[in-house]
Amino acid sequence: MSDAAKAEKVMDALKAAEREPAQVALPILNGLVGLVQGDHEQRLEVEEARSSAFLAICEVGKALHRGQSAGNLWTAAISATERWLALAR
C-alpha cells in the first residue's frame, strides 16, 4: 500500500474517531499504528510528516486514555496527517 493510501486511511479513521467517545476512539487509534509506521524508505519530507502524524496521534491516544480533553490534539493530529497526505501524493 502506498504512503498516500495509508495517509488517506489514517485521515478517514481520525475523522471518524474524533466524533466518538474515548472508549470507542481508542481502539480506532490503536488500529492505526501499522499504517503510520514506516515500512520502506521515503523522501525525508514524507518521513518527517509521517513521523509527526504518528506522534500527534499518540498524543491524542494518551489524552483519551487519561480522560483528558483532546480537542486541540485532534486538530494537531488531523493537520499532521493532512501534511503527510499532501507530501505522499
Image (cartoon, grey):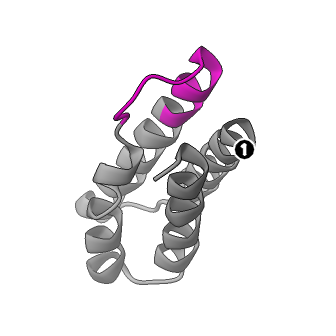
Q: Residues within 10 Å of mark 1 (few under 14, many from 20)?
A: few
Residue 22 lies, in percent from the top left, at: 33, 75
Above or below residue 45? Residue 26 is below
Q: Residue furthest front?
A: 1
Residue at image point 35% right, 63% down: 29
> Considering the image in quadrants, where does the C terminus appear?
top right
Above or below residue 42? Residue 21 is below
Residue 44 falls within the magenta-colored stretch: yes
Residue at image point 59% right, 31% down: 49
Q: Is residue 61 left or right of residue 74?
A: left
Where does label 1 land, which residue?
89
Front one among 31 and 42: 42
Residue 67 falls within the magenta-colored stretch: no
Q: Amino acid at mark 1?
A: Arg
Q: Which residues are magenta?
A: 38-50
Residue 85 lies, in percent from the top left, at: 67, 47
Residue 48 lies, in percent from the top left, at: 55, 23
Count up the numbered dots: 1
Above or below residue 52? Residue 53 is below
Residue 44 lies, in percent from the top left, at: 58, 16
Residue at image point 30% right, 51% down: 33
Residue at image point 62% right, 55% down: 78
Q: Secondary structure at mark 1?
A: loop
